[in-house]
Image (spheres, grey):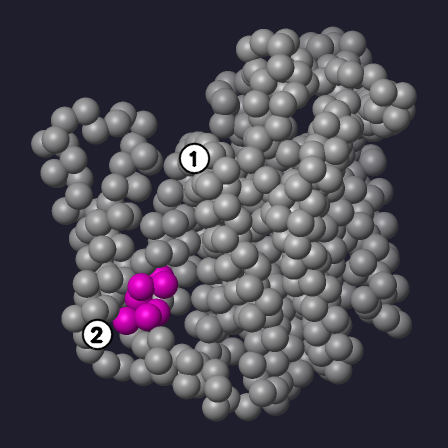
């Protein structure tokens, strides 16, 4: 959509000032040292208002890129989840205000009505309905007396997902904008991968920026490079590889693939491993002919390299264990967890099964609209990390996205979520089949396959609508539609270095 240049009215400027003031108060939470005096707050507010106003007056696409780069970059490793969400809300809020001030909501509505139906994004309405229901569920949770902090956190994640999708769908007005967004995200995710690998090399000296794992006969502490975004990056790169026509292109793709695969392997997360495997299988299903054969061959190369490296990499002061032993221990431990869970064992290892046993009956207590956003459930403290007690505690986090949605938003909310996902896959697959076999189709295949992997991962980790991954998934969904609906270039097999 072309932006309409005009001067914002008094109402827009008033909304801008109100949003700036609210964002200024929110940004105080980002500082590790709370403002303990009125003077400090007075000094901070003008600075925050000035930054917000500058961002709102900047081209909205630039502000959106800043938000997505922040969400996928190593900067958030030094922040808590609340601080990261506050900065994300600050940037996305400035982008929304800037978009409204530059384009005007009336012109947006008029354009959406008059525009060719074939050019409309089919997901704007479903995602908007889901976000509106999320706001209603937050109000319902507030009426039920759920903790305000939990309500705000749950509601923000639904709104963040919707806002990112809307902004990406509206602000990518040309092929150049799409390339800019893809380059920015890929580079930012690669920097995150490299930063985590550097922290892994530092080991315990890296501090608490990354989680760690201790196990094996050597009892060696290993830093875990857990980066959910790396699975999306891997899937896009592996789908691009079959289209590499020159040695230079293949070199650059492998230069990005190797650290990405290492990051996923060293996460020691069985969920990320399964997510990557499912995304790879989905890629093979989406691709066809020679492209599928090349993709399968590249995947085999990656697998062989990982096995050889893991078998030869010795850890521990005695050098008795290899990284492959660590992988095997993690896999066998996962099998034991499943067996103990089905057997009804109550322990930290079976906490996901405990959640299902505890929460499922509560879903039936309020089946239609749930317990409202922000709702908690009672679980034994021994099943929660850093609970500080073995007694019963109120706990909010839930590993299974679909169970959490049914618990808090009811079967109506779960049905809306499944409707959004079903509509997305139906629409994108229909358009995907009509695309010529060029780099854009490969990117769409990578994004689509990565989302399939995230759906499986959300059974054990609610990434789909969980900050910060929800923003990247929403961007991936919007970009995939933008790619299938943008007019094809004159040369459909254009050089990947110019396309990405």
Instruction: Give the number of marks.
Output: 2
Q: Report whether 144 appears left or right of 105.
A: right
Placement of the N terminus among the 4 image quadrants = bottom left
Magenta-drawn stretch contains 96: yes
Residue, x 32% and y 77% (percent of image)? 104
Q: Nearer the viewer, mark 1 or mark 2?
A: 1
- Give the vertical position of 20 relative to 500 (above or below): above
Q: CA distance from mark 1 to mark 2?
A: 34 Å
Q: Nearer the viewer, residue 323 or 268?
A: 268
266 over 170 or under it: above or below? above
Give the overall secondary structure of the magenta segment. helix
Q: Which residues are magenta?
A: 95-101
Q: Which residue is mark 2?
A: 8
Quadrant hosting residue 424: bottom right
Residue 298 in the image: state x and y as whole percent: 81, 55
Q: Nearer the viewer, residue 55 or 436?
A: 55
Mark 2 crowdedness (10 Å alpha carbons): few <14, some 14-19, many ≥20: some
Q: Position of residue 483 (x, y in %)?
A: 61, 75
Badge 1 element: helix
- Give the labeled residue for mark 1: 149
Q: In the image, what residue occupies the spot 29% across and 41% down?
A: 27
Element on which disc 2 rests: loop
- Tell me, yes or no, if residue 371 can be seen here: yes
Q: Could you tell me which residue is drawn at 79 percent across and 54 percent down?
A: 280
Q: x and y percent of residue 237 in the render? A: 68, 58
């Amino acid at each position: 959509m072309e932006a309409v240049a005009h001067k914002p009215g008094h109402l827009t400027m008033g909304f801008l000032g109100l949003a700036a003031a609210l964002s200024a108060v929110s940004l105080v939470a980002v500082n590790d040292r709370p403002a303990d005096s009125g003077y400090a707050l007075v000094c901070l507010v003008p600075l925050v208002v000035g930054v917000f106003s500058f961002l709102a007056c900047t081209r909205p696409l630039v502000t959106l890129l800043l938000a997505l780069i922040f969400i996928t970059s190593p900067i958030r490793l030094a922040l808590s989840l609340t601080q990261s969400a506050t900065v994300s809300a600050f940037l996305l809020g400035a982008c929304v205000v800037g978009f409204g001030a530059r384009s005007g909501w009336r012109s947006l509505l008029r354009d959406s009505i008059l525009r060719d139906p074939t050019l409309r994004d089919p997901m704007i309405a479903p995602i908007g309905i889901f976000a509106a229901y999320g706001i209603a569920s937050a109000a319902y949770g507030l009426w039920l007396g759920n903790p305000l902090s939990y309500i705000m956190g749950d509601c923000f994640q639904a709104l963040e997902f919707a806002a990112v999708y809307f902004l990406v769908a509206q602000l990518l007005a040309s092929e150049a904008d799409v390339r800019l967004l893809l380059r920015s995200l890929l580079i930012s995710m690669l920097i995150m991968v490299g930063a985590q690998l550097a922290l892994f090399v530092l080991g315990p000296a890296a501090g608490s920026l990354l989680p760690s794992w201790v196990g094996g006969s050597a009892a060696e502490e290993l830093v875990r490079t857990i980066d959910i975004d790396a699975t999306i990056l891997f899937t896009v790169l592996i789908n691009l590889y079959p289209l590499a026509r020159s040695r230079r292109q293949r070199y650059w793709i492998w230069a990005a693939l190797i650290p990405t695969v290492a990051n996923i392997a060293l996460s020691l997360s069985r969920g990320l491993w399964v997510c990557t495997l499912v995304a790879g299988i989905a890629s093979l299903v989406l691709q066809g002919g020679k492209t599928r054969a090349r993709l399968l061959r590249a995947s085999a190369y990656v697998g062989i390299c990982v096995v050889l490296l893991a078998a030869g990499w010795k850890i521990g002061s005695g050098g008795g264990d290899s990284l492959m032993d660590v992988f095997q221990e993690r896999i066998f431990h996962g099998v034991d967890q499943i067996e103990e869970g089905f057997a009804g064992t109550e322990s930290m290892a079976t906490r996901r099964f405990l959640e299902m046993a505890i929460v499922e009956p509560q879903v039936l207590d309020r089946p239609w609209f749930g317990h409202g956003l922000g709702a908690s459930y009672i679980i034994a403290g021994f099943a929660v990390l850093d609970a500080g007690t073995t007694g019963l505690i109120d706990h909010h986090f839930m590993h299974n996205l679909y169970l959490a949605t049914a618990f808090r938003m009811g079967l109506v909310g779960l049905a809306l979520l499944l409707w959004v996902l079903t509509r997305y896959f139906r629409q994108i697959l229909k358009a995907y089949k009509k695309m010529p076999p060029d780099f854009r189709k490969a990117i769409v295949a990578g994004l689509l396959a990565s989302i399939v992997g995230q759906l499986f991962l959300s059974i054990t980790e609610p990434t789909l609508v969980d900050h910060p991954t929800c923003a990247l998934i929403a961007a991936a969904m919007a970009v995939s539609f933008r790619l299938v609906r943008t007019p094809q270039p004159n040369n459909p097999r254009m050089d990947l270095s110019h396309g990405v």
